[in-house]
Structure formats: C-alpha cells, structure tokens
Image: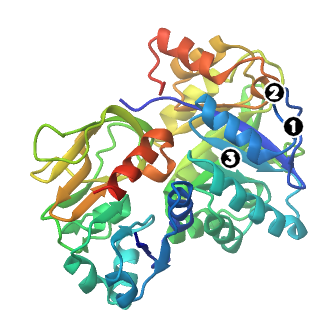
Amino acid sequence: MKLVIIDYGAGNTQSVKFAFQRLGMAPVLSSDKDEILSADKIIFLGVGHAKAAMEVLKEKKLDVLIPQLKQPVLGICLGMQLLCKHSEEGDTECLNVFDADVKLFEPKLKVPHIGWNDTMGLHSKNGSVWNFNKDYFYFVHSYYVPVNDFTSAICNYVTDFSAAIQKNNFYAVQFHPEKSGAAGEQLLKQFLSI
Amino acid sequence: MLTKRIIPCLDIKDGQTVKGVNFENLRYAGDPVELAMIYANEGADELVFLDITATHEKRKTLAALVEKIAAKINIPFSVGGGISSVEDVNILLKSGADKVSVNSAAVKNPQLINDIADKFGSQCLILAIDAKETTGNWKVYLNGGRLETELELFTWAKEGEQRGAGEILFTSMNHDGTKNGFANVALRQLSETVNIPIIASGGAGNMEHFYETFTAGKCDAALAASIFHFGEIKIKALKEYLYQKQIPVRL
C-alpha cells in the first residue's frame, strides 16, 4: 500500500510519519501532484494558523487538488479544519469538502483545549467508521467544528463538538492519533484497513 | 471530560538523563529514550525533556535525541532548555517535538513569545516560569533560578498569555525539592489570572499532593521528576488513586 503524507511544511509531519512507521508502513512525504494522485491512501495534517496554511496550500495548488482526491484521505487536527468551508481563525475560506464552519471556543473554560479527552465514535449512526467508546485521545486546539451531519465522533469541551467528521472518502479527526497512545494507533490501523 | 495530565520530567545532559533512575529491567539507566518508553507505557500523559547543557554546540545532539524519542513514543512531549530563537524552535519541531518550552530567553526578549506563536502556533509553546516567594511577593528568576529579576510572577504570566503562550509551566523554587506539596495558593491564583492551562511543578512528594494541586491548586497538569525516577510513586498507581478520588484521569 502506498501511503502519502501531504507535505506542505506543517509542523507535525515528522510525528505522523513516525507513527505510521511504527505500524510497519513506509509513508512518502510529498507535495507533488502526481505523487499524491498515485497514493492508495493520503494523510492531510497541519498545526498552526488556518490562514497561513491555506496560503501555502494555494501556492502549491494543493487547494484545487485535495478536494478532488478519490482515495481515502485522513485529515488530522488543522487538516480537519481546513477540509471545512470556513474558519473563524483569520476569517479564512477553506477547502469546502465539508459544508461546515470552524469556530473559536468560547472562553468559558481554558483555551486552547489541551489534553486527553474521552471521545465517542458514532458507529451506530451515520455509518461512522469509528466504533470507539469513550476512548481517550489527545487534543490540542482552540477552534472546533460544531456537531453537524458529517459528525462521526463526538467529544465535549465547553460544548459538544465534532471529534471526527466523515464524508465519502474523506475522514478527518480533530485529535492527534499519532500522539494518542494505543487508542491512536488503533485508529490509524483502522484507517489503513478501510 | 478533559482529564488532568501527569507529566514526568526528564533532565538531559549530553544526551543522557541526569537525575538518578531506579527501574528494574532497565538496561541503560541513563537512556532517555528507554525511560520515555517506560513512562509512556505506564500511563504518563505527556513528557517534558529539559536539556540542562543546552549550549549551542549541543543543539545538534539535542535535535538528534528528539528525533529518536519521536520515533519511539506515541504520546506528546515538549523540549526545553536554552531555547532562544525561532530557528531553535524550528529545528526541534522539525525533529519531532510537539512543543517547546521557553524560559530565560523569553524574559530577556518577550517578543520571542510572539514570534514563536505567530510562526508555529500557541499550541506548541509552553512558557516556563521559575519563581520564588519572599515577603508575599513572587519574583521571577532566570538561568535555572540563579538570577533574580524585577518581574512579578502573575504579571509576567498574563503578559506571556497575551503574547501567545499556549500553556504555563510554573515551578515554585520555594517548593522544588522539598517533597512537601505544590505551591497551590500561587497556582490557584495563576489559574484565575490567565485562561490557558497551568502545569504545576515543584514539591511533589506523595499522591495526595497531586490531588491537592488539581483541586486546591486548580491545575490542569502536574509535573514531577525524582519521585517517578526513583519509583517512589508509580504513575499507574497514582492515576488509579486520583480516579478513586474523582479526579478525571486517563486510565
């Protein structure tokens, strides 16, 4: 299986590469269109600012390519938010794979939301691929995707929010499976088996 | 529910852990990678690596070590010690660190906090503060507690938050090494002053101290070194104890 991690300078590329290597995979890092299109599965990650990330994606013409991908794509953290329509972070137009808005947490609790939080996969509804039940995943984020028709897993911080969203071949998670211990490894394995 | 984090801290010198370790079946007591893996398997929520050599010549050694750690462990970790520029941060994050902590360099040049947060995001930036209380005033100290400044702890923490720090790691020099518990009064005030997570450091001696810092101290995470390294407290047992006491933890 050919696994490509879309490489556009996101900070956590190395961690995600290592996580797949621990599962015996040999992920390829690339921003090249042909290389990405030749993949069986694709990882789209990101940390940092939505606006800055979208600018890099546009520069590399990845903003056109990514929504057209037909292979299973796993978006992680900012990658998930960029797959949505719009983000309040920098008032940024995103890739619009998911017709959903990304919002800033109200400061009723500390922001960013940092740490391990229990998460419920909506396997019984929505045809979600995630069947985890109150498993703990590691989150680090200030912006969130509200619960919507695409929600495939739910977590709660300040409010219920989408821990994962899913549509056709696009699977995206707000948390960091590459940093979520055994539960995270299980999720990555499950994505590889889709 | 978001859980409280238990964070072992590993001091690194020339690529080796320095504080004594007391683990059975540990081949190389000084190997940070092996120690990190043990902690991750025992249920640590995150790890902090503090490079106490941290001179410019050692920077490459540290980056190589970070890469080795990142390749092996599957929980988040931060790296600190002598970080003084955006380029330092870039190298460590590229090597696989999830976060960096800045301390003295941020006091000397507060703009560094903005620069790191703008380039890499607040989520990867811990502002580490060492402070000491004398006659009711908490003063910030530099260079591992050797140099007193005029800065006041709560003012500096607030400024750090406004400049873009994502978390605050507060070490009380009055409590560090005493094993008499964390600085819960100051920690609580800190937690009420800023709206970013607070990591308590300095003073852990028994399990109850962790309970107290999560309740009376209102902390989000608690860090300790020697009690974990010497096996006085096992992380798994600590988390089970906290769970029994109704503290949300990841088991």
Write down the residue under mark 2: B23
Residue A168, given in percent of the width and then of the height, sits at 15, 63
Q: Regarding mark 1 in the picture, which secondary structure is present there?
A: loop
Who is closer to the viewer here, B204 or A171?
Answer: A171
Q: Are marks 1 and 2 in contact (CB under 8 Å)?
A: yes
Q: Nearer the viewer, mark 1 or mark 3?
A: 1
Q: Are marks 2 and 3 in contact (CB under 8 Å)?
A: no
Number of dots carrying numbers: 3
In which chain is the residue bearing label 2? B
The color scheme shown is rainbow
Residue A156 relative to residue B169: left or right? left
Who is closer to the viewer here, A151 or A189?
Answer: A189
The three-letter amino acid code for the residue at tag 1 is Ala
Separation (CA) of disc 1 from disc 2: 8 Å
Q: Nearer the viewer, mark 2 or mark 3?
A: 2
Residue A163, given in percent of the width and then of the height, sits at 28, 46
Write down the residue under mark 1: B29
**Which circle's residue, 2 or 3, is located before the other in the chain?**
2
Residue B233, given in percent of the width and then of the height, sits at 72, 18
Write down the residue under mark 3: B128
**Label 2 in the same subunit as label 3:** yes
Residue A165, given in percent of the width and then of the height, sits at 22, 54
The three-letter amino acid code for the residue at tag 2 is Phe
Q: Are marks 1 and 3 in contact (CB under 8 Å)?
A: no
Residue B97 relative to residue A165: left or right? right
Q: Residue at 34% of width from left, 69% of height from top?
A: A41
Categorize mark 1 by other alpha carbons within 10 Å: few (<14), some (14-19), many (20+).
some
Q: Regarding mark 2 in the picture, which secondary structure is present there?
A: loop
Please tell me whether residue A179 is drawn above or below residue B121 in the rendered image. above
Please tell me whether residue B173 is drawn above or below residue B208 in the rendered image. below
